[in-house]
Amino acid sequence: MMQGYKNVERVKPSGLELVDKLVGVQRVTKVTKGGRAFGFSAIVVVGDGNGVVGHGLGKSKDVASAIAKAIEDAKKNLIRIPILGGTLPHEQKGKFGGAKIFIKPASPGTGVIAGGAVRMVLESVGIHDVLSKSQGSSNPHNAVKATFNALLQLRSASAIAKQRGISIEKVFNG
């Protein structure tokens, strides 16, 4: 998922106080000759509330081990997101599968205006003021990945200035 993004900064989980949030658990049925075999898939988002976040998927025959596997997977996929004063640096759209997510910075005191899976991702990142709209599919797997798609495209003003080889003042003033 992280391929194709130039500004992705991967983070090691050691030394971070990560908080995990369970986005969803689905019961999966496999029909075999001997009957039905039930399993569970869990999607989890982990973050430190300070710009570091990751998501993971775990599958198992019981719920507890599916969640444990998902947390381990999420810790392997940690990335750093630029945050500007508790909100986003700019608005962004993200898409994955049938899910489309639009996230927009908001003034202080607005809160996290988002639903379901998108809210959990944004809270795990540490964003306190944001407006979002989820369109298309409400599947939590695709909504989480679409939100990550939007977050991975975010760039801070200092990163843009460095990439263009100009000062930060010139980025804002032209």
Image (spheres, rainbow, N blue to C red):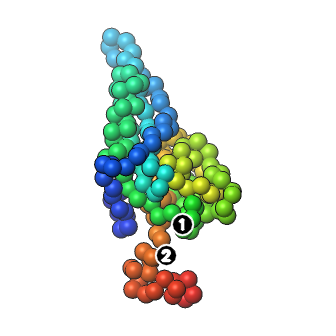
Under mark 2, the amino acid is Ala
The answer to whether residue 133 is seen in the rendering is: no
Quickly name the residue at label 1.
84
SS at mark 1 in the image: loop
**Mark 1: few/some/many CA within 10 Å (<14, 14-19, 20+):** some
Q: Residue at x 54, y 66 (%)?
A: 84
Question: Which of the labelled discs sits on residue 13, or is there none?
Answer: none
The answer to whether residue 87 is seen in the rendering is: yes
Q: Position of residue 114 (x, y in %)?
A: 62, 49
Q: Residue at x 43, y 33 (%)?
A: 42
Q: Which numbered disc, 2 or 1, marks the residue that appears first in the sequence? A: 1
SS at mark 2 in the image: helix
Q: Position of residue 67 (x, y in %)?
A: 40, 31
Question: Which quadrant does the C terminus fall into?
Answer: bottom right
Q: Residue at x 59, y 55 (%)?
A: 128
Nearer to the camera, 123 or 100: 123
As drawn, 142 above or below 108 = above
Q: Position of residue 73 (x, y in %)?
A: 33, 41
Discs 2/1, front: 1
Side of 81 relative to 133 (left or right): left
Under mark 1, the amino acid is Leu
Nearer to the camera, 122 or 43: 122
Quickly name the residue at label 2.
157
Q: Are marks 2 and 1 in contact (CB under 8 Å)?
A: yes
